[in-house]
Image: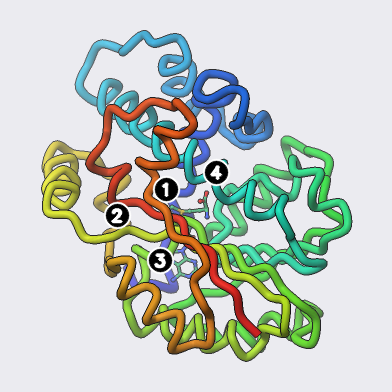
Amino acid sequence: MSESERTASRTAVLVCQGRAAADGRFAADRFGDPVAVRLLRAAERTAVDEVRAGTPPQGWQARTAYESVRACAEVVVPRTVAIDDALRAGVSGQLVILGAGLDTRAWRLSALAATDVWEVDHPASQQDKRARLAEAAPEATARSVRFVPVDFATDDLGAALDAASHDPALPTTWLWEGVVPYLTRDQIHATLSALTARTAPGSTLVVNYQSPSARAAAGRLLTRLLGNAITAGEPWRSLWTPAQMATLLAEHGLRVTSDTSLLTLAETLGSPTRGRTSLKSGRVAVAEGG
Ligand SMILES: C[S@@+](CC[C@H](N)C(=O)[O-])C[C@H]1O[C@@H](n2cnc3c(N)ncnc32)[C@H](O)[C@@H]1O
C-alpha cells in the first residue's frame, strides 16, 4: 500500500483511547478529556473500560490491546497537560493542528473561544474523524473549526492552508503532537518550510517529539514482534535529541523557549510512570518564531 492509499491512522485511535482511559483517573486535577470517549466506536471502548476498571482481560489479543491503551494513557496525560497549558498561556487567534488525528481540543478547551482552528491531517484519517464527529456531535468550544486534508509526504501544506483561508500575516499557534516520529526528515523539513513561510511575528510552535532511546526502540520492536498491529502499521521514521530539535527549529527561524521530557512532567503531575523508558524519550518543546 502506498502512502496515499493508506487507511485511517490506528495510532490516532490508540492515543484517543489513552485519553479516554485516563480521563478522571490519572492526574484528575490537571488532566481531563471527556470528549475522547465520545469519538470511539463501541469495540474501541472495551479496552478503555477495562483500563479504567483496572481489570486486565484474559486472552492474548485482548491483553495486548489492554496493555497498549494502559501504556498510552500514561504517555498522553503529561503531553496533553503540557500542550493545554501552553495554549492557555497564550494561544493566538489562529491555531493550526498538524496531524490532528482525534484531537479534541477544539471541542473541549474554552481557551479557544476566540481562536479559529485548522485541523490538518492525512485525508484518510480526517475522513474517519469527520464520520466520528458526525455521530458524536460534540459542540465546538473553538470559534471555528476547518478541516484541511493534507498528506505531508506528497501535498503542498502552504497551498492547502491558503485554500482554507488561513492568514499568513496574522500570528499562528502551530501544534504538532505525536506526528514527528512518523515523518521522514525530508517531510519534516518540508513541513517546517511551509510553516515558517506563514509564521508572522508573535507565532508559536508547540511540538511533541521522540528522542532516541535504545531501550524504547527495543520495547517497540518487542511489541511489534508480539503482534501489536497498531505500531507495526505506522513505523517511527525520525527521532531527535533536544539539541538536534533546537538546531532543526533554528534552521527554520524558530527559537526553543522550553523543552521538557514527559517523565519530568508526569512526576510533577503525580501521574503514573510505570513506563519510565517511553516517558523519558517523549518530549514537548515550545518555540517562538516570526
Ligand atoms: C499518533 S497520531 C497523533 C494524532 C494527534 N496529534 C494526537 O496526538 O492525538 C499520528 C497522526 O499523524 C498523522 N500523519 C502521519 N503521517 C502523516 C502524513 N504523511 N500526512 C498527514 N498526516 C500524517 C496521522 O494521520 C495521525 O492523525
Q: Position of residue 190 (x, y in %)?
A: 46, 86
Q: Nearer the viewer, residue 230 or 200?
A: 200
Label 3: which secondary element: helix
Residue drawn at (21%, 60%) of the image: 212
Query: Disc 1 designates what residue?
Result: 10
As measured in the structure, the alpha-carbon distance from the residue carrying label 4 to the one carrying label 1 is 19 Å
Residue type pointed to by label 3: Val
Residue drawn 48% across the image and 77% down it = 152
First in sequence: mark 4 or mark 3? 4
Q: Secondary structure at mark 4?
A: helix
Question: Relative to residue 167, is residue 257 drawn left or right?
Answer: left
- State the residue position of label 4: 80
What is the C-alpha distance between the residues marked 4 and 3? 16 Å
Ligand 1 lies under 8 Å from the Cβ of mark 4: no
Q: Is residue 243 above or below residue 110?
A: below
Q: How far separated are the C-alphas under marks 3 and 1?
A: 16 Å
Badge 4 local density, few (<14 within 10 Å), some, or many (20+)?
many
Q: Which mark is residue 180?
A: 3
Q: Which residue is labeled 2 in the image?
A: 233
